[in-house]
Amino acid sequence: MAEKCILFMARTTRFHEFARTLTQSLGVEVSLATPDSPNAAHDFDLLMLDGDGIRNDRIDQIAKWLEDRGGIPMLVIVDDETLPSLRLPAHSRSDFICSSANPVELEARARRLMGDDDSFNLDDILHIDNLVINLATYQVYLDDEPVDLTLMEYSLLSFLATHPNRAYSREVLLHRVWGFEYCGGTRTVDVHIRRIRSKVGPQIAAHITTVRGVGYLFKD
């Protein structure tokens, strides 16, 4: 099989060595480009994008450019502190990885996006009434239309939906969804629940139950 190529697109060199670990682990070629001059790139099988300083609308533009090139997948490297504001384009083959991840996780995510494993299956698709949650691609659809969730909204919704009929306190949700290092208050959970309910419509919002004195529960 011909050697595959990964295009690493970044404004700085901070993750060049991180990206180049795939040369050894996957046996691929890693080429470099910048977000402002992508058209100089030759054929490639995966775009890795350092999301530092890249706005969501620019990520959308890059995703459309990849779609025009035959639907090339995209892996976005995002800093932990900017993760809550990241939005991956709907209907694109995209994934994200935190900048604190190790090369083993990078290899696994790149391999899956390039179709070199069998990790995607029907168990990755969760149907709840008229809502579909794709656990493999981090995408949510309501009546076949994409729902514009931030990654933290998605993470909270998918956690509750995959752990139904059990009440979770706000503190536990902060630890399980945001991570043990998160320093924000429990009001963050309430804000995200309110935003999720407003985006998924009343039918799905009715599944997300407030448990007085405890937190939240997702009814299946």
Image (tube, rainbow, N blue to C red):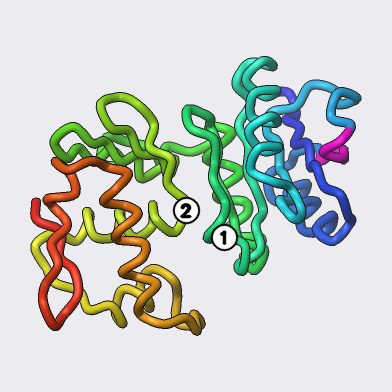
Instruction: Indicate yes or no whether the magenta region holds residue 33.
Output: yes
- Based on the displayed image, in which of its 4 quarters is residue 147 positioned? top left
Element assignment for label 1: helix
- Please tell me which residue is depicted at 24% across the width and 60% down the height of the picture: 160
What is the C-alpha distance between the residues marked 2 and 1?
7 Å
In this image, 148 relative to 101: left or right? left
Q: Give the number of the disc on residue 151.
A: 2
- Please tell me which residue is depicted at 38% across the width and 78% down the height of the picture: 175
- Please tell me which residue is depicted at 30% across the width and 59% down the height of the picture: 194
Q: Which amino acid does label 1 sit on?
A: Leu
The relative height of residue 91 versus residue 24 in the rendered view (above or below) is above
| Label 1: how many Cα within 10 Å (few below 14, some 14–19, many 20+) | some
Instruction: Specify start and end residues of the magenta stretch as a single range.
Output: 30-36
The picture places residue 214, in percent across and down from the top left corner, at: 16, 80
Instruction: Indicate yes or no whether the magenta region holds residue 44.
Output: no
In this image, 59 relative to 160: left or right? right
Task: Work out whether residue 40 or residue 51 is closer to the camera in this orientation and state it.
Answer: 51
The picture places residue 72, in percent across and down from the top left corner, at: 63, 26
Screen quadrant of the N terminus:
top right
- Based on the displayed image, in which of its 4 quarters is residue 61 positioned? top right
| Label 2: how many Cα within 10 Å (few below 14, some 14–19, many 20+) | some
In this image, 192 relative to 218: left or right? right
Q: Which amino acid does label 2 sit on?
A: Leu
The picture places residue 188, in percent across and down from the top left corner, at: 39, 72
- Please tell me which residue is depicted at 9% across the width and 62% down the height of the picture: 165
Element assignment for label 2: helix
C-beta proximity under 8 Å, tags 2 and 1:
yes
The picture places residue 16, in percent across and down from the top left corner, at: 84, 54
- Mark 2 or 1, nearer chain start: 1
- Which residue position is annotated with label 1? 83
- Based on the displayed image, in which of its 4 quarters is residue 139 positioned? top left
